[in-house]
Amino acid sequence: MHGNEFATAVQYGVPVIVIVVDNGMYGTIRMHQERDYPHRVVGTGLSNPDFAAYAKAFGGHGETVRTTEEFMPAFQRARASGLPAILHCFLDPQAITPAKTLDQIALGG
């Protein structure tokens, strides 16, 4: 997604809900780095903008979600707004796969 797509959705009143899952890194690349070169991380960290504020700047609905419990109420508010929306969901960087953490992968687990 780029700003122009979200701006177009706002302009034409398309109530799309965009869910941004943010673990602060290029996760797949980081997972391979930890597996093959444990604790030698290069170029995978990200500094992302506040996507909820970004949505509001265009005239849409934006919310930040930090816990699982916060997700459904935020999603319902986004739907009820009738506006294009971005839900910026933060995810623990350690939760790289459903079965293993980054630390477990680095340790050869």
Image (cartoon, rainbow, N blue to C red):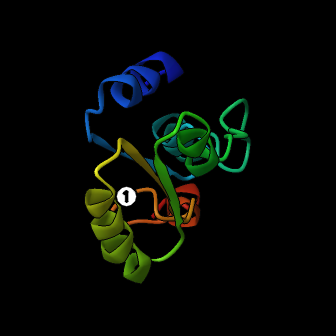
Q: Position of residue 71 (x, y in %)?
A: 37, 71
Q: Position of residue 13 (x, y in %)?
A: 29, 32
Is 58 left, or right, of 99 in this rendering? right
Q: Give the vertical position of 15 relative to 103 (above or below).
A: above
For the question of whether residue 99 can be seen, the reply is: no
Question: For the point 35% across and 41% down, which residue is it?
Answer: 84
For the question of whether residue 15 can be seen, the reply is: yes
Tell me the crowding category of disc 1: few under 14, some 14 to 19, or many 20 or more residues within 10 angstroms, Cα based.
few
**Depth order, front residue of 29/65:** 65
Quadrant for residue 66, please give it: bottom right
Instruction: Give the residue at the far top of this rendering.
Output: 4
Going by the numbered disc 1, the residue's amino acid type is Thr
**Mark 1 falls on what kind of element?**
loop
Question: For the point 48% across and 77% down, which residue is it?
Answer: 67
**Depth order, front residue of 76/59:** 59
Residue pointed to by mark 1:
97
Quadrant of the snapshot with the C terminus: bottom left
Quadrant of the snapshot with the N terminus: top left
Question: For the point 27% across and 40% down, which residue is it?
Answer: 16
Q: Position of residue 106 (x, y in %)?
A: 58, 56
Q: Position of residue 73 (x, y in %)?
A: 34, 76
Is 44 left, or right, of 78 in this rendering? right
**Depth order, front residue of 42/15:** 15
Quadrant for residue 102, please give it: bottom right
